[in-house]
Amino acid sequence: MPFDLDQVRLRLPGRDVVYFDTLDSTMHQAAGLAQSGCAAGTAVVAGAQTAGLGRHGHSWHSEPSSGLYVSIVLRPDLEPDGLPSLTLALGLAVAEAIARATALECDLRWPNDILLGGKKAAGILVNVVESAAIAGIGINVNHQSFPGDLAGLATSLRLAAGRPFSREDLLVHLLLAVDGFCRMLREAGRDAILEVFERRSSYARGKPVVVYQEGGLLHGVTAGLDASGFLLVDTRDGKRETILAGGVRAAGA
Amino acid sequence: MNIEEIRELIDLVTETGVAELEVQRGENRVRIRRGVQVESLEVTAPASRAGAAVPPPPTGKPAEKVPEPVPPAPNSETLVKSPIVGTFYESASPGSPPFVRIGEAVQPGKVLCIIESMKLMNEIEAEVSGVIASKLVANGQPVEYGEALFGIRPV
């Protein structure tokens, strides 16, 4: 189904939303708009991406008309050490938007993978440039299958619920939820975001995990977040490690 | 550092046309400055990096090939420090060329590297004009808050 941008504009008057049927990457387009001084909250949406970006050079599987691929220009006015909490806030916003649009309850895997039934349904990437943070959000909405290795790792809202959903409706909920959690971060501070994340994510505390890090695997049980939002893991040999980087996976999964 | 490595560095200076290059490997630090005809060499004893923490005022002058005749004070290098805890990436994606190389002239605003923290990619930009004199962290390595990433020598 073609994307109905008018429907979004009608429900979010005054919001700058640009839509492209096909784009190399919504991140590139949004970075250009940010540089030319666009308003905070401006969103770039694509029906399909030919070079969708994942984390540091990973690609993002972008199937035409099945997913929602959006980059939002944020001007969070945070000190650099407050930025990691933005990543958590965006994960919470995506989970909230999905819950409102579909009634599906997602889990959050630190820092911001959105999981349904243990498989990834959405991913988030943030690029901080001089004057803005560009939040790239990819949500698998109406995919009916995934190719090859992805099938075991990825899912879509449709696969999880057994019915298709409106991408326009999801986008409206997403932009509102991103506004809401950014306001929470700005007004209530990062502690509020960390607290909500700990309540919302099964991975935050008491979860046996394996962390894939530079230099090897780390096995342990999660023990909450530190003041910056980094994940704490109690390892098998009784040490408490702060996870600054690396992929966190459920142990035995 | 052996004579072969120093020779390579001299070649690098000559090929790239940069005015000056300083490299620290372990205990040794070598600075190569292009003269009109010959390269001059200075090999110094281990210097404390902490001493270089005070940045000189940016000159704002474009890179010049003719260096000043008087050697600058050894502490004139500006250190680019990480504003956050994260992972250092020298390029936009694995396999793509690094944002900057040692010996390259940079202007304020030039992206030097990315520090990733919790899937948040922070572009670190040069704040002064100069030449990249040293790269202090290897690609993919973790960095601490305030850790020095690059040395920039004003020109």
Image: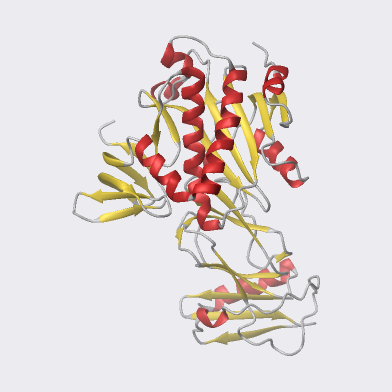
Whether residue A57 is visible here, answered yes or no, is no
* Left or right of A36 on screen, residue A148: left
Give residue B73's position: percent from left, percent from top.
65, 87
Residue closest to the eye, B9 or A243: A243
Task: Look at the image and tell me in which quarter the C terminus of chain A lies.
Answer: top left
Closest to the observer: B49 or A156? A156
Quadrant for the N terminus of chain A in the image: top right
Q: Which residue is drawn at 48% across and 29% down?
A: A96
- Using the image, determine if residue A101 lies above or below residue A86: above
- Can I make out residue A51 in this image? yes
Give residue A235's position: percent from left, percent from top. Answer: 23, 50
Residue B84 location (% of width, % of height): 51, 59
The residue drawn where x is 49% and y is 48% is: A188
* Above or below, comparing residue A51 to residue B153 in the picture: above
* Residue located farthest toward the front when viewing the structure as drawn: A187
Image coordinates for residue B12, horizontal then vertical, percent: 66, 69
Q: Quadrant of residue A195?
A: top left
Residue B134, above or below B69: above
Does A239 appear above or below A164? below
Q: Which residue is most to the left?
A: A237
Q: Using residue A120 as the reference point, say whether residue A125 is left or right of it.
A: right
Residue under the image location 67 percent in, 53 percent down: A130
Name the outermost residue toward the bottom: B70
